């Protein structure tokens, strides 16, 4: 798993460790020391920890004027045992929201499992962003099915056409435009 690193091709456009408004501002990454792990497998040191024992993320792009953040995840999303959504909401989302972000693109192709719990933090997140939205793209089918069984789909948009987006070939603004156009069709 240490070979799975966060998407790096947009680093010329955005680096969370250099963004003074990012929760991860000032972080230094040691490319030679692997300290974080999932299922006893070390993960690449570029992934950011935010309080979860099994889920890590990387903010790969943020545009405060447009109010959009794109976050990539790796690991097991476990609200049942570890209340991952609480840590994500309190330690990452709230800080981004405070700085004008109200649209979130969550990339989940490296999320291996999802275990639902209470949906209170998802509801709070949804209520907090008013005119914004939360879009989940490229989550694995079994993860998406579990999210639906846990009623997370009341607060986040997932499913077609978000399942198979070839987002890595796009620049950040093109992905944002694509997701926003789908959101307008769904919400309009």
Image (spheres, helix red, strand yellow):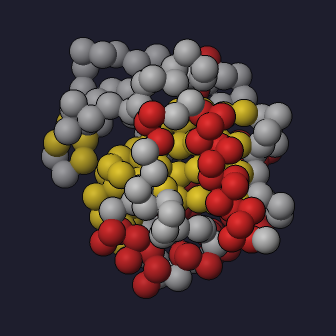
Q: Would you place residue 162 above or below residue 141 in this image?
A: above
Residue in the picture at 60% in, 23% down: 14
In this picture, residue 60 sits left or right of residue 145: right
Label tally:
0
x and y percentages locating residue 100 in the rendered image: 81, 42
Horizontal and vertical percent position of residue 99: 79, 39
Q: Position of residue 131 (x, y in %)?
A: 83, 61
**What is the quadrant of the C terminus in the image?**
bottom right
The answer, for residue 177, to whether it is visible in the render is yes
Give the image quarter of residue 181: bottom right
Question: Looking at the image, which residue is at 74% across and 71% down?
Answer: 187
- Say which quarter of the image contains residue 98: top right
Question: What residue lies at 24% left-to-right and 15% top-to-bottom?
Answer: 32
Q: Please state the horizontal and vertical placement of residue 40, each as a whole percent of the image.
A: 16, 46
The answer to which of 142 and 175 lies nearer the viewer is 175
Left or right: where 74 falls relative to 101:
left
Which quadrant of the figure contains the N terminus? top left
- Residue displayed at 55% across by 15% down: 12
In the rendered structure, the answer to whether residue 98 lies left or right of residue 104 reads: right
**Foreground: 28 or 134?**
134
Residue 138 position (above or below residue 37): below
Visible residue check, residue 82? no
Quadrant assignment, res 146: bottom left
Taking the image as shown, residue 17 lies to the left or right of residue 64, namely: left
């Amino acid at each position: 798993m240490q070979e799975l690193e966060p998407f790096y091709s947009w680093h010329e456009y955005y680096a969370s460790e250099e963004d003074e408004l990012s929760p991860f501002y000032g972080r230094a990454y040691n490319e030679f020391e692997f300290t974080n792990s999932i299922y006893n497998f070390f993960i690449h040191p570029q992934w950011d920890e935010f309080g979860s024992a099994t889920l890590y993320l990387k903010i790969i792009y943020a545009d405060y004027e447009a109010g959009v953040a794109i976050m990539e995840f790796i690991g097991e999303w476990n609200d049942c045992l570890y209340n991952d959504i609480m840590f994500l909401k309190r330690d990452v989302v709230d800080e981004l929201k405070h700085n004008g972000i109200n649209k979130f693109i969550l990339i989940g192709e490296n999320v291996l499992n999802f275990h639902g719990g209470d949906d209170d933090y998802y509801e709070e997140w949804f209520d907090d962003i008013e005119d914004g939205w939360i879009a989940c793209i490229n989550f694995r089918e079994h993860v998406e099915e579990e999210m639906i069984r846990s009623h997370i789909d009341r607060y986040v948009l997932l499913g077609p056409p978000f399942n198979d987006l070839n987002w890595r070939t796009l620049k950040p603004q093109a992905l944002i435009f694509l997701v926003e156009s789908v959101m307008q069709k769904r919400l309009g």
